Image (cartoon, rainbow, N blue to C red):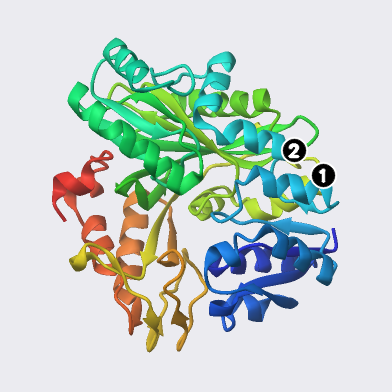
């Protein structure tokens, strides 16, 4: 592997470029016209424009990205997260073009990308799943029958969904009938696939995911859990590891289930198996993400394993250099996502020019970002502009470091959610680890 094209932008593109530099691998940055002065274009060995600002014409334009790889002589493509990272067609075209796709095979992405199909696969593997429909529902009549069988409340979910889109809760038959067509329309618009499925709604759960690594030689390990429960409208805001509700016994059970899930799917690369954990510590499979996650740094902080480098080594055909028993978990890590948005205006995005910036530092603090003083945040993409990741020997130490880091953070010129995140971090129930997925609404921030 001599040259990797990064089919992404922002902080994840910068993150991948840095890993490649440390591995002495040449990099190619792609950029839209709106990203001409973006940091990832400056850090890469080469940069090539692939289209206008609109994602459909640039970062989602498969033809232009493949052509960019040919023009620059890139032999591999890293998709990052979002955009085309879980697009089976993109992975397949890479395979057919003799370009290494740094992720699982197109067949595996296709298999696990459909949430209802992946759920059936997990059932076969003996992994606990949330009660619900067997695959996609066939119509409203079928949906009503299934809902009455498993009991209300239920969740209507887009089969090809992700990122919190295409999800509605129905507490009774009337709400089910109202939301059914709404979810189908949302699924069609967001994913070009209107198939939906039904799950029992688990009230006030914890959202806990397991990071796995799987090589092409049949070796699969897990790197522990990440608690992603602090969410707003199904969008993660704060993640931490270890989870305050997961003990060693539950960690082993969930880790083993995740490894089993990866093996039955024939999975390679890094991946994340997401679970819901109820108040009785029963856990249920939700979905498997076939890409690197936004929150991967907290796992790196706790294990010392560079997940991006492992992705690259795996696709190069290397065997994992460590066994499960050799992985050490130490301390506590927390991540806060810094978004350019105004919490006082219903989290309205806040693009614009950064006029002053001060990023926190010190022992145990990591900043993943692509912004700089004078940088103009374009209005065309996701509002996340930075991630603050802290590491402490204990959870209390990690919380104290995050408080300090948020206090030190200065980003002037645009609105951010810094103060909103600070109010969560200092909340007594968060400090006690007493929270679930309804936390933001219940605490009325």
- Which part of the image, by quadrant, shows the C terminus? bottom left
Name the image quarter holding residue 157.
Answer: top left
In this orientation, which residue lies closer to the viewer: 428 or 46? 46
Name the image quarter holding residue 205.
Answer: top left
Label annotation for residue 385: none
Q: Which of marks 2 and 1 is nearer the N terminus?
A: 2
Label annotation for residue 215: 2
> What's the residue at 45%, 70% (across, down)?
380
* Lateral position of residue 358 relative to residue 91, left or right: left
> What's the residue at 37%, 21% (across, down)?
282
* Lateral position of residue 58 relative to residue 380, left or right: right
What is the distance, in whole Å, between disc 2 and disc 1 at their CAs? Answer: 7 Å
Residue 324 image offset from top left, x and y in percent: 65, 33
SS assignment at label 2: loop
Residue underneath mark 1? 318
* Lateral position of residue 293 relative to residue 319, left or right: left
SS assignment at label 1: loop
- Which part of the image, by quadrant, shows the N terminus? bottom right
Mark 2 crowd level (few <14, some 14–19, many ≥20, 10 Å Cα):
many
Tell me if residue 56 can be seen. Answer: yes
């Amino acid at each position: 592997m001599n040259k990797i094209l990064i089919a992404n932008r922002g902080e994840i593109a910068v993150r991948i470029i840095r890993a490649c530099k440390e591995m002495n691998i040449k990099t190619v940055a792609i950029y839209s016209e709106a990203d001409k002065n973006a940091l990832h274009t400056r850090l890469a060995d080469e940069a090539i424009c692939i289209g206008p600002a609109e994602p459909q014409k640039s970062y989602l334009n498969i033809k232009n990205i493949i052509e960019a790889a040919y023009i620059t002589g890139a032999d591999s493509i890293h998709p990052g997260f979002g955009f085309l990272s879980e697009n089976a067609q993109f992975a397949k075209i890479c395979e057919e073009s003799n370009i290494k796709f740094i992720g699982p095979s197109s067949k595996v992405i296709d298999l696990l990308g459909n949430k209802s199909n992946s759920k059936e696969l997990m059932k076969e593997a003996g992994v606990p799943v949330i009660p619900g429909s067997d695959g996609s529902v066939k119509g409203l009549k079928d949906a009503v029958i299934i809902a009455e069988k498993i009991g209300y409340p239920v969740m209507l979910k887009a089969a090809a969904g992700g990122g919190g889109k295409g999800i509605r809760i129905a507490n009774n038959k009337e709400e089910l009938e109202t939301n059914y067509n709404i979810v189908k329309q949302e699924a069609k618009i967001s994913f070009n696939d209107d198939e939906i499925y039904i799950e029992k709604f688990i009230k006030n759960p914890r959202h806990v995911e397991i990071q796995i690594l799987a090589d092409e030689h049949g070796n699969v390990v897990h790197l522990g859990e990440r608690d992603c429960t602090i969410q707003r409208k199904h969008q993660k805001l704060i993640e931490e590891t270890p989870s305050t509700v997961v003990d060693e016994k539950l960690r082993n059970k969930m880790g083993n289930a995740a490894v089993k899930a990866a093996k039955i799917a024939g999975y390679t690369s890094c991946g994340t198996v997401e679970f819901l954990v109820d108040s009785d510590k029963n856990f249920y499979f939700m979905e498997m993400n076939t890409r690197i996650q936004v929150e991967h740094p907290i796992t790196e902080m706790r294990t010392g394993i560079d997940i991006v480098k492992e992705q690259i080594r795996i696709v190069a055909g290397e065997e994992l250099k460590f066994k499960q028993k050799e992985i050490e978990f130490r301390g506590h890590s927390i991540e806060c996502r810094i978004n350019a948005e105004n919490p006082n205006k219903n989290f309205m995005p806040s693009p614009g020019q950064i006029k002053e910036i001060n990023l926190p530092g010190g022992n145990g603090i990591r900043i993943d970002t692509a912004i700089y003083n004078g940088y103009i945040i374009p209005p065309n993409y996701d509002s996340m502009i930075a991630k603050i990741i802290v590491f402490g020997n204990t959870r209390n130490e990690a919380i104290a470091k995050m408080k300090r880091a948020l206090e030190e953070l200065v980003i002037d010129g645009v609105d951010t959610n810094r103060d909103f995140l600070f109010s969560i971090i200092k909340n007594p129930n968060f400090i006690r680890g007493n929270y679930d997925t309804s936390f933001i609404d219940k605490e009325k921030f």
